[in-house]
Amino acid sequence: MAKTSSKTSPELLAPVAEYFKVLSEVSRLAILDVLRQSGTMNVTEIAEATGLGQANLSKHLKVLTQAGFLSRRQNGVSVYYEIADPAIFELCELVCDRVKERLLKQAQQFEKFEAFL
């Protein structure tokens, strides 16, 4: 979010909240990860790679496509998905780095606690 001198309105923050809401589901992150590693895939391939059932997968693919994270194209009877906005992975890497730092700090604190016992 850009820094401004005035308070940001809820109307402007709502789309940001929706963006993060889309990313708050483990299954959606798994789909993004699979497509990041493999490139364009059809629904069957994504289902096999993620272990998600057809109905559940379809729901998540729809949400990711509507949010602009994925693009969709039909080829005959198969539907193929690919990453539409690769910048999403910069955000994911930033978040993963922060989570890793936090977990390492917690592990260090746990080691100190164990040494005390």
Image (cartoon, helix red, strand yellow):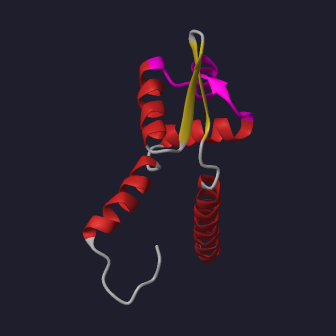
Residue at 45%, 83% in the rendered image: 3
Residue at 57%, 36% in the rendered image: 31
Query: Taking 114 as reference, is 40 above or below it?
Result: above
Residue at 68%, 41% in the rendered image: 36
Percent of width and height locating residue 115: 65, 74
Q: How many marks?
A: 0
Query: Taking 107 as reference, is 68 above or below it?
Result: above
Percent of width and height locating residue 104: 65, 68
In screen coordinates, is 51 left or right of 17? right
Percent of width and height locating residue 75: 62, 16
Q: Front-most of 50 and 58?
A: 58
Question: In the current view of this chain or complex, which residue is farthest to the bottom?
Answer: 5
Percent of width and height locating residue 90: 64, 60
Q: Residue 40's quadrant in the figure?
A: top right
Question: In the current view of this chain or complex, which residue is farthest to the left?
Answer: 10
| Residue 37 inside the magenta-drawn segment | no
Q: Front-most of 48 and 105?
A: 48
Question: What range of the chain is rendered magenta?
Answer: 38-54
Q: Residue 5's quadrant in the figure?
A: bottom left
Question: In the current view of this chain or complex, which residue is farthest to the top?
Answer: 77
Placement of the C terminus among the 4 image quadrants: bottom right
Residue at 40%, 61% in the rendered image: 16
In screen coordinates, is 6 left or right of 49? left
Query: Taking 40 as reference, is 77 above or below it?
Result: above
| Residue 53 inside the magenta-drawn segment | yes
